[in-house]
């Protein structure tokens, strides 16, 4: 919608009056109470420090100074950054390929394929992780059973070298279908005469995918990318649940979120946990905006 | 588009499909086995003595039927949050889309900015705040935070913009209908598909929620299925004398039982989540 029609519509249909604020008020009230208030409370708590003697004392930004030089936290953030750089592109490229395949019209059983790939999204991440944990298992996991039958060494999916990849596999399994559906829906909304025009101009299927479909997918891809940033930096369920299977590899600071949880509930250090939560939120918001800005700048160039 | 079908592409996509469905097949197969068969028979096929019914009965009666309690809790939390969140988001989305008032732009942008704030980064602060007002370890600790869905509001605002024609509202006003009446009698009906989409997404989010109930609830009677299954799981793997291997079968059967309703709901309500995802992905 262009700016001028928006203004025209605003003048004509939209009216001022007390009803608008009343419709919005319940949501906004809860938003303030349940979103802004915890955020504010966390900010407040993060400025204090509990001491063994003398109770709580104002600490200024010292919790944040500790956090940015805390090797446990930094290691977790770097690990998630590595996870993000590898897992997210793999997941989104797969989702994109599957969406293009579904949209190509060349597929038999397209409906079954689409619903089947999406099905893991309906599986709670707790169940998905427990299930993959059993599948990875060295005793009765099918991979271990097969390798014993064939006579090759049992793969150590939860060993030091493989565990991050194994986690990435669980997350990929859970979310490829969700991203695929978003991209597929965006593809379906491209007007078909665009394809016809391209075909008349002599473009083949690959050429159409590259030059017509990909540009049309940009907003949807951006959305999936931003959601993936948010998702990967707050990874918690999967490592927390796999921890008992790999206690020496997945430590209590394996991801930043797991670290904040450990600080608050095992270490009873709520002030520092609040600072870590706050910083983590900040990192995610900054990375999300960086992704959006880079993508937009590339479009402008 | 084309009538021509490609066999190689179909075969490739069926291989892909196997990767997504085999783990679920394994889970279903595993929930038909005795603990002993789990260890001794091949995982991807049924054993000689399938005992699904026995496993289901053992799972739902274990520990005074605590598993059924967890299922009910999950249902309560998920439905309460989803219906509440969808109604709040719908009313507010309509308000933002069809009315212009002082501060409306700023308020909407504030909520829009909140979409980026990760829910888990908010969970620990919410726990600390709820601990102060003694809301932890109650159902409200799970439902209240799930009522605010910034993404739901964003979706409903976009949806309301087009789904409810201004001329229709104008005509109803000329007929003398009050704003609330217009919303309930006219707009709500037109907004229903969007509303169902938000219900569905909040339902899934609450059904799947683990972090929030994990930190908010101590009482096993209040656990949702996710936290309950994870508790059984950690009891079954905790090494040494404390490990209870019977629980492995309960975890597997319980997992299957908790997945089935959601998969069925998604298959039945396909139209809604697809249109919702389309709205979110295309017009941003």
Image: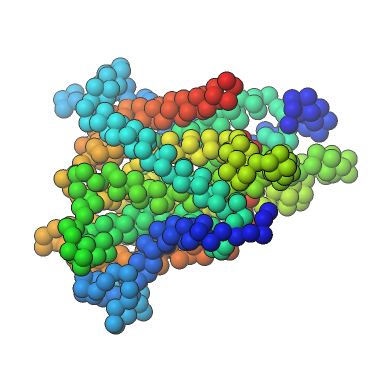
The C terminus of chain B sits in image quarter: top right
Q: Position of residue B228 (x, y in %)?
A: 33, 59
Quarter of the figure with residue A11: top right
Image position of A287 (left or right of B65): right
Q: Residue at x 79, y 42 (%)?
A: B165
Q: Position of residue A59 (x, y in %)?
A: 27, 18
Rendered position, A59 above or below A185: above
| Whether residue A45 is visible | no
Nearer to the camera, A228 or A35: A228
Q: Residue furthest front?
A: A202
Q: Residue at x 65, y 28 (%)?
A: B104
Quarter of the figure with residue B233: bottom left
Q: Residue furthest top?
A: A60
Nearer to the camera, B55 or A294: A294
Image position of B215 (left or right of B76): left
Q: How many marks?
A: 0
Q: Position of residue B238 (x, y in %)?
A: 17, 57
- The colour scheme of the drawn protein is rainbow
Rendered position, B201 above or below B233: above
Q: Residue at x 63, y 38 (%)?
A: A212
Q: Residue at x 19, y 44 (%)?
A: A160
| Whether residue A88 is visible | yes
Image position of A281 (left or right of A15): left
Q: Residue furthest left?
A: B241
Q: Residue furthest right?
A: B175
Quarter of the figure with residue B231: bottom left
Nearer to the camera, A205 or B253: A205
Q: Position of residue B125 (x, y in %)?
A: 37, 35
């Amino acid at each position: 919608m262009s700016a001028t029609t928006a203004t025209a519509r605003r003048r004509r249909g939209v009216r001022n009056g007390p009803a608008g604020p009343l419709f919005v008020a319940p949501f906004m009230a809860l938003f303030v109470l349940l979103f802004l208030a915890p955020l504010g409370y966390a900010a407040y708590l993060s400025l204090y420090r509990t001491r063994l003697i003398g109770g709580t004392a104002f600490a200024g930004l010292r919790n944040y100074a500790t956090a940015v030089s805390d090797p446990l936290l930094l290691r977790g953030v770097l690990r998630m950054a590595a996870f993000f750089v590898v897992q997210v592109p793999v997941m989104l490229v797969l989702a994109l390929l599957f969406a293009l395949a579904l949209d190509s019209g060349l597929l038999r059983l397209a409906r079954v394929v689409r619903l089947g790939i999406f099905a893991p999204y309906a599986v709670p991440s707790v169940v998905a992780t427990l299930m993959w944990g059993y599948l990875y298992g060295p005793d009765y996991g099918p991979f271990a059973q097969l390798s014993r039958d064939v006579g090759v060494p049992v793969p150590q999916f939860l060993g030091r070298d493989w565990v991050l990849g194994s986690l990435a596999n669980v997350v990929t399994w859970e979310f490829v279908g969700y991203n695929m559906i978003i991209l597929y829906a965006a593809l379906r909304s491209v007007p078909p005469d665009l394809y016809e025009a391209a075909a008349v101009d002599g473009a083949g299927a690959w050429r159409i995918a590259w030059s017509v479909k990909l540009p049309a997918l940009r907003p949807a891809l951006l959305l999936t990318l931003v959601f993936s940033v948010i998702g990967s930096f707050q990874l918690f369920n999967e490592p927390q649940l796999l921890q008992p299977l790999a206690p020496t590899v997945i430590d209590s600071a394996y991801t930043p979120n797991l670290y904040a949880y450990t600080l608050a509930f095992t270490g009873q250090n709520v002030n520092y946990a609040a600072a870590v939560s706050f910083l983590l939120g900040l990192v995610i918001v900054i990375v999300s905006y960086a992704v959006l800005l880079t993508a937009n700048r590339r479009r402008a160039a | 588009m084309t009538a021509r079908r490609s066999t190689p592409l179909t075969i490739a996509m069926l291989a892909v499909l196997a990767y997504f469905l085999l783990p679920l097949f394994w889970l279903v197969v595993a929930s038909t086995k005795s603990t002993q068969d789990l260890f001794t028979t091949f995982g991807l096929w049924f054993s000689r003595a399938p005992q699904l019914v026995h496993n289901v009965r053992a799972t739902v009666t274990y520990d005074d039927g605590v598993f059924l309690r967890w299922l009910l809790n999950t249902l309560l939390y998920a439905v309460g949050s989803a219906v509440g969140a969808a109604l709040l988001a719908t009313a507010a989305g309509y308000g933002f889309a069809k009315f212009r008032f002082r501060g409306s732009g700023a308020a909407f942008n504030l909520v829009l900015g909140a979409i980026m704030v990760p829910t888990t980064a908010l969970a620990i602060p919410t726990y600390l705040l709820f601990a102060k007002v003694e809301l932890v370890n109650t159902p409200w600790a799970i439902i209240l935070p799930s009522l605010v869905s910034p993404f739901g509001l964003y979706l409903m605002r976009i949806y309301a913009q087009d789904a409810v024609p201004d001329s229709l509202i104008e005509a109803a006003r000329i007929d003398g209908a009050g704003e609330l009446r217009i919303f309930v009698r006219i707009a709500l009906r037109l907004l229903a598909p969007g509303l169902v989409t938000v219900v569905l997404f909040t339902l899934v989010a609450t059904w799947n929620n683990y972090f929030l109930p994990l930190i908010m609830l101590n009482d096993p009677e209040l656990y949702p299925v996710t936290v309950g299954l994870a508790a059984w799981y950690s009891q079954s793997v905790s090494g040494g004398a404390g490990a209870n291997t019977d629980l492995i079968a309960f975890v597997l059967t319980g997992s299957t039982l908790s997945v089935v309703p959601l998969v069925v709901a998604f298959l039945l309500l396909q139209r809604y989540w697809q249109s919702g995802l389309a709205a979110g992905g295309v017009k941003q």
